[in-house]
Image (cartoon, grey):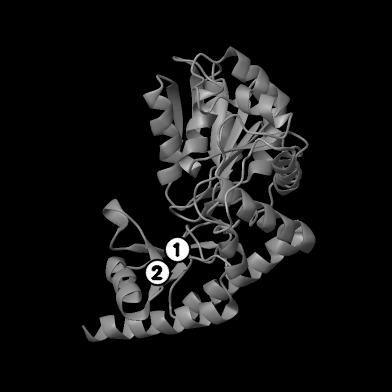
Amino acid sequence: MHKKLMIVGPTEIEEEILALGSKPQVYMRTPEFSARLQKIFANLQYLFQTKNPVVFFASSGTGTLDAAINNFLSPTDEIIVVNGGSFGQRWVDIALRYGIIVHEIKVEFGKSVTIQQISEAIQKHPNAKALYTTLDETSSGALTDLAAIGTLLKQYPDILYVSDCVSALGVEPLKMDEWRLDVVVSASQKALAIPPGLGFMAVSPKAVEFATKSKLRSFYFDILEHLKDHQRNQTPFTPAVSLVYQLERRLEKIVNEGLENFQKRYFALTEEVRSAIKSLGFEVFAEHPASCVTAIKTTQYDAAEIVRIMSQKHNIEIAPSGGSLQHTLFRIGNFGNITSQDIKAMAQALAQTIEELKHD
């Protein structure tokens, strides 16, 4: 039996979009396929709210994080990383692998970085070439104020401003150009609600200039090669053709609905999730919670048992946490094709799960 996915990716996918994944393959080096990519590239710019080019790789979101390090830096460069959880830590781990000197802004789990913290870090590390952030720290559900950071960075025009928007693209306001972001990365399996396998990267002219000086650029993720092919509405290597079909239709639907309406609809469902969990005595964990990722801390019940029972007895997958948090924190996602009816069913199953744990 299919288990309803209320995790933080991959997500429930509409039947219409799923069906497109089974279409016959086509040769990608044709005028017809280029016309398809031209429309996709334009709609991605709308989604990222940018006039800058947006390219895509056949990769997961982590592939784009890797590309956001190796395209713009050289060994022994210094960077500042906002680290408030698993995905802030991922920036750190990737950068260290490449021999980058990392200065971390350690943010308490569930909290959001402050402008003062960033300002102090920049003053303390004046040789930092870039600032790496995460719009939605998926491990805690905490949101970062990228707009405010962009305002601060007006004073530091030489610093490259980069953000992981993997779980935030589409569901959170994101205005790449207005907020002065230089590199924004995301992926296909969250709000876009198509299968995993496409990673996206939008780059500013400043980022391109950084790339020309990088001593780390990889062969496959080389942004300069991707931008060269982007100009002719192509990709340098074989794209994930089936995912391209699905992406094309998903972007069309977002454009037709309007990005603001798309976000409002998602946010309304997120509020339903949070109302339901509060009615059961739980609280939202994050200080400034992001949309579609609701982290819930519990000391009364075993979070790992909640996740297990929801999956095994109610066929609803919710997201566990790892390490020291596995017994105290779980997360509920409402990305993708999740409806009010699904949320009501989840709340009912969670209530039954709690009753079972009480009796145990």
- Please state the horizontal and vertical placement of residue 301, each as a whole percent of the image: 29, 73
Closer-to-camera residue (49/60): 60
Closer-to-camera residue (17/193): 17
Does 249 sit left or right of 4 as displayed?
right
Quadrant location, the N terminus: bottom left
Residue positioned 69% across, 61% down in the render: 263
Closer-to-camera residue (333/202): 202
Q: Residues within 10 Å of mark 2 (few under 14, many from 20)?
A: many
- Please state the horizontal and vertical placement of residue 216, each as a whole percent of the image: 48, 18
Label 1 residue SS: loop
Quadrant location, the C terminus: bottom left
Mark 1 or mark 2, which has the lower sequence index?
Answer: 1
Q: CA distance from mark 1 to mark 2?
A: 6 Å
Q: Residue 2: which quarter of the image? A: bottom left
Residue positioned 33% across, 69% down in the render: 307
Q: Is residue 85 visible?
A: no
Q: Which residue is mark 1?
A: 7
Q: Residue 359: which quarter of the image? A: bottom left
Q: Which residue is mark 2?
A: 317
Residue type for callout 1: Ile
Residue type for callout 2: Glu
Residues under numbered marks 1 and 2 in contact, where contact means CB atoms less than 8 Å apart: yes
